[in-house]
Image (cartoon, grey):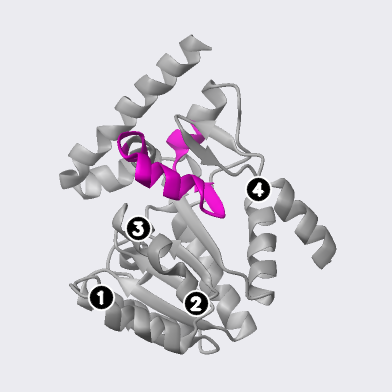
Amino acid sequence: MYNNTLKENAMHKNRVDILGTEFDDFTEKQFHKYLDYDLDTKANKFIVTANPEIVLSARKDSKFLKIINNADYVIPDGIGIIKGAKSLGTPLHERITGFDTLKYLIEAADRKQLKVYLLGAKPEVIKATADKIEKDYPQVDLVGYHDGYFKDDAPIVDEIAEKKPNIILVALGYPKQEYFIEKYRQKADAIWIGVGGSFDVFSGTKKRAPKVFQKLSLEWFYRLITEPTRFGRMLAIPKYMKLIKQEKNRK
């Protein structure tokens, strides 16, 4: 099984370029198989969950773009990425969300009795996330957690190096979380992933879009109507689609 997984894992490096950001093209089922293999072999992996906002940000920041494209996995977290890829004639298999990946990793840690470290979000959110893991995933060894309000990286990095978690979930928002992971990932051979605001939903602090919105790929619309303050961020989507159209016309 491992030989096949190694072969498939190497093959997924054929990436799809969407406005400069290079996405892995595999199904969620395949991705989960790679993650299981990585956890079983204690591999050091960096996952970027990229949506249109991140793609636009990376176009303006060459250092951020390099960090993303050098990550081990870049998954299409946003229906805009799927639509953009299809429009450019390089379709991706399916959307793979950061939230669902976070859930899968915690479930895998529970099955395999692995160590997890949490970083980021507000103090009450990170505490609620830790409480939920300890209650609902009793086989997870939660070796530490810290909110996102810190000025000195050193104590956190030292704790990670000492505890040697297998999974490190970083909720500092982009690009801060990706810069943090890139800088410190060698401190622990773990799966490192930037999860943005996923702790809010996972902990129950905020509700995820109902299934009907998820099925129709309208989670962005649900977030907009429930959090009108996100309107400014949502403007990234039409800007992104305009760039996709321009890129398509150049081909």
- The residue mark sitting in front, 1 or 4, is 1
Say which residue appears at 26% left-offset and 37% top-offset.
234
Amino acid type for the residue under numbered disc 1: Asp
Quadrant housing the N terminus: bottom right
Crowding around mark 1 (Cα neighbors within 10 Å: few <14, some 14 to 19, many 20+) is: some
Amino acid type for the residue under numbered disc 3: Tyr
Task: Give the CA separation, mark 1 to mark 4.
Answer: 32 Å
Q: Which residue is mark 2?
A: 188
Extent of the magenta region: 57-83
- The location of residue 23, given as percent across then percent down, is 54, 41
Q: Earlier in the sequence, mark 1 or mark 3?
A: 1
Q: How many marks?
A: 4
- The residue mark sitting in front, 4 or 3, is 3
Task: Give the CA separation, mark 2 to mark 4.
Answer: 27 Å
| Magenta span: chief secondary structure | helix
Q: Is residue 203 visible?
A: yes
- Asked if 112 appears above or below 180 in the picture, the reply is below
SS class, disc 4 = loop
Q: Which residue is mark 1?
A: 147
Q: Which residue is mark 4?
A: 27
Say which residue appears at 64% left-offset and 56% top-offset.
31
Crowding around mark 4 (Cα neighbors within 10 Å: few <14, some 14 to 19, many 20+) is: some
Task: Give the CA separation, mark 4 to mark 3.
Answer: 27 Å
Q: Which residue is mark 3?
A: 179
Inspect the magenta stretch and tell me whether residue 75 lies in it.
yes
Say which residue appears at 31% left-offset and 80% top-offset.
156
